[in-house]
Amino acid sequence: MFSPSIKEVKEIAKNEEYKRIPISYELFSDIATPIEVLRILKGISNHCYMLESIEDAEKWGRYSFLGFDPLLEFTCQDGVVKIKGDADFNEFNDDLVTIETDNPSVIIKDLILKNKSPKLDYLPPFTGGFVGYFAYDYIKYSEPSLNLDAENQDQFKDIDLMLFDKVIAFDNFRQKIIIISNIKTDDLENNYKRACDELKDIANLIKNGKKTEIESLKLKSEFKPVFSREKYCDMVE
């Protein structure tokens, strides 16, 4: 059974604040583990993730979240934002956009508003959106007075995010897998049908998909300390 129903979706869509609506489908979670599903997703998408919720330092949280096949890639480095992906889901109507800015958070907020969805009580707290990281150097955009102009030796981007409209959530409390696909609020009938078909395809993938092997990490060089033992001891003292 798909939730919400098409009738409920039409009611939700009357609120013009929402640009997308999450549609969900449930399975029992005894058919696969989050790691097994991640191995399946790695075989069909170059971009996938797994996030574990945690309640405190001692306990695992209720949910494990997985996603794949992002709509958009959003990166920023040294004030240059690049947005790559589905033009229908960004405000610039282009599949590759480059923008110079001193405040990338404004662009991120605009993208979030354009893809805003309702919070439904029976769904997990995360039903889709941006996944990625903000580097430590991101603070230079909110605190330019710090003058952080040191060389970026590790070549980390200041921001590296991807926008996911499909989520696979393991509910460890209810022992269910909740598959979520977000639809746009235009052409609701057709979008709803496509989402239902997509959810069934993802369910079949979880049940029958081929699990890829995750390669072990390999050292490409010897470990080299940044400081000598003597210098490190001096710094500690």
Image (cartoon, rainbow, N blue to C red):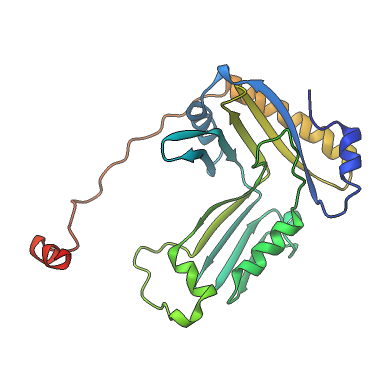
In front here: 72 or 135? 135
Residue at image position (74%, 53%) is 115
Mark count = 0
Residue 187: horizontal and vertical position, in percent?
Answer: 89, 44
* Residue 155: percent from left, percent from top: 40, 64
- Residue 149 against residue 51 in the figure, above or below: below
Between 39 and 113, the one lying in front of the other is 113
Residue drawn 16% across the image and 67% down it = 235
Using residue 172 as the reference point, say whether residue 93 is left or right of it: right
Please tell me whether residue 82 is drawn above or below residue 161 in the rendered image. below
Residue 182 against residue 60 in the figure, above or below: below
Q: Residue at x 61, y 42 (%)?
A: 69
Q: Quadrant of the C terminus?
A: bottom left
Kindly identify the residue that appears in the image at 19 percent across and 52 percent down: 223
Residue 148 located left or right of residue 173: left
Farthest residue to the left: give it. Answer: 230
Observer-nearest of 220 and 206: 206
Considering only vertical position in the picture, is 69 above or below 112? above
Indicate the position of residue 152 as horizontal and vertical percent values.
Answer: 38, 69
Left or right relative to 162: residue 39 = left
Quadrant position of the N terminus in the picture:
top right
